[in-house]
């Protein structure tokens, strides 16, 4: 396959075109990450949600979606998103999206919607609570992705600096892709370094935190949900190694099984958005990941639940970047 050309505008990358009533297809070339076997899962998650959004009134917003990855998608063949209108109520609605490639079902998603201004008619009393964002680090501790990777992975010897071609390809996403990242320099470590705050901690005692935002401004308000869906698959499952004090990219095989997002309130993905990841369960090669998403005011705007199949190689001492 030809080398993928990174583009910086997420709205253009994820555009879908209408084929016929309730059927859409990707309008741009599909992104296959370097070294991956198939299309980035976030693309499927986001475009399926985008297709569902296009079939409801602008008065409705998504409140959650639940997705299942059935078959890996390749980057050469169009993906068709078929939307079924399961329910259209006065205050809520439901859509089911099935994604096909070469007439094979590869992905499913169910999306729930609610009336946008439903929350304006609030009850006199309500239960209200959210888990605060971790406060063990200052925003100033986070570095641009390329800088944190240089300091935390290359300078420390975690990644071999002589693998120039692979490194250059990996680093391009930080300079040219549609997403900007902020990581700590410890993000790339295995957690046993003397200065690493996760040293000696068990998996359930660790949280992995980072910041994301889109590189080019989003112009369509509802597209913020699509962008968040896309980014919700970026650095969730891959962080599982950090909870077990292993190099970040040291799995032999890693694939998402299912992926769900709950939207708690609207957000603006043009702003730096705080992702905080937890790992409550691991076993039988299945890894359960939880993510909480906070806006610039540290209000929780979304929650992510993802389970993946991850196979490791205990003999691997260096990251396979």
Image (cartoon, grey):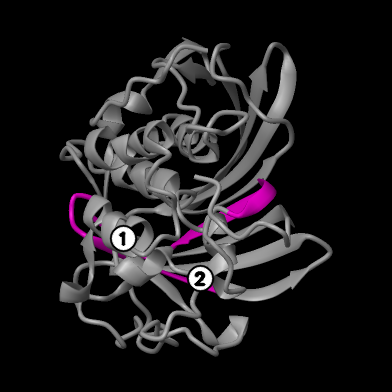
Binning the other alpha carbons within 10 Å of mark 2 as few (below 14), some (14 to 19) or many (20 upward) gives many
Tell me the quarter of the picture where residue 70 sits. top right
Q: Position of residue 289 (x, y in %)?
A: 60, 66
Is the Cβ of the residue at disc 1 closer than 8 Å to that at disc 2? no
The residues tagged by marks 1 and 2 sit, at their Cα atoms, a distance apart of 14 Å
Quick check: can you spot residue 203? yes
Q: Position of residue 168 (x, y in %)?
A: 33, 35
Quick check: can you spot residue 275? no
Pick the residue in front: 151 or 19: 151
Whether residue 306 is situated above or below residue 255 in the rendered picture: below
Pick the residue in front: 218 or 76: 76
Residue 119 sits inside the magenta stretch: no
Q: Position of residue 300 (x, y in %)?
A: 35, 73
Q: To which residue does mark 1 refer?
A: 155
Whether residue 153 is situated above or below residue 44 in the rendered picture: below
Whether residue 7 is situated above or below residue 185 in the rendered picture: above
State the extent of the magenta-drawn residues as a range: 250-278
Q: Residue at x 29, y 33 (%)?
A: 10
Q: Residue at x 52, y 15 (%)?
A: 21
Q: Secondary structure at mark 1?
A: loop
Binning the other alpha carbons within 10 Å of mark 1 as few (below 14), some (14 to 19) or many (20 upward) gives few
Mark closer to the chain start, 1 or 2: 1
Q: Residue at x 39, y 67 (%)?
A: 187
Whether residue 47 is situated above or below residue 228 in the rendered picture: above
Secondary structure predominantly adopted by residues drawn in magenta: strand
Q: Secondary structure at mark 2?
A: loop
Residue furthest toward the right?
284
Q: Which of the labelled discs sits on residue 190, or is there none?
A: 2
């Amino acid at each position: 396959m030809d080398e993928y050309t990174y583009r910086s505008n997420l709205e253009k990358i994820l555009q879908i075109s209408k084929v016929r009533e309730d059927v859409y297809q990707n309008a741009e070339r599909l992104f296959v990450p370097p070294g991956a076997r198939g299309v980035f899962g976030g693309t499927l998650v986001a475009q399926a949600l985008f297709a569902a959004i296009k079939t409801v009134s602008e008065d409705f917003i998504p409140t959650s979606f639940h997705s299942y990855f059935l078959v890996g998608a390749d980057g050469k063949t169009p993906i068709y998103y078929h939307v079924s209108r399961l329910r259209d109520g006065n205050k809520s609605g439901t859509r089911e999206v099935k994604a096909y490639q070469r007439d094979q079902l590869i992905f499913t998603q169910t999306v729930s919607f609610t009336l946008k201004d439903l929350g304006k008619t609030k009850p006199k009393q309500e239960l209200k609570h959210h888990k605060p964002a971790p406060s063990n680090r200052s925003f100033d501790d986070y570095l641009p992705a390329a800088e944190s990777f240089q300091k935390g992975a290359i300078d420390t010897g975690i990644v071999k600096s002589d693998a120039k071609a692979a490194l250059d390809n990996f680093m391009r996403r930080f300079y040219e892709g549609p997403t900007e990242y902020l990581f700590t320099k410890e993000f790339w470590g295995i957690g046993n370094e003397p200065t690493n705050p996760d040293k000696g901690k068990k998996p359930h005692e660790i949280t992995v935190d980072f910041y994301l935002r889109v590189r080019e401004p989003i112009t369509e308000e509802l597209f913020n949900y699509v962008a968040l869906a896309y980014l919700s698959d970026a650095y969730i499952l891959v962080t599982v190694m950090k909870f077990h004090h292993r190099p970040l990219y040291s799995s032999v095989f890693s694939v998402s099984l299912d992926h769900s997002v709950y939207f708690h309130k609207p957000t603006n993905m043009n702003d730096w958005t705080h992702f905080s990841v937890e790992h409550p369960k691991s076993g039988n090669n299945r890894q359960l990941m939880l993510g909480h998403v906070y806006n610039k005011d540290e209000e929780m705007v979304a929650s992510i639940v993802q389970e993946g199949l991850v196979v490791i190689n205990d003999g691997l001492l260096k990251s396979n970047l």
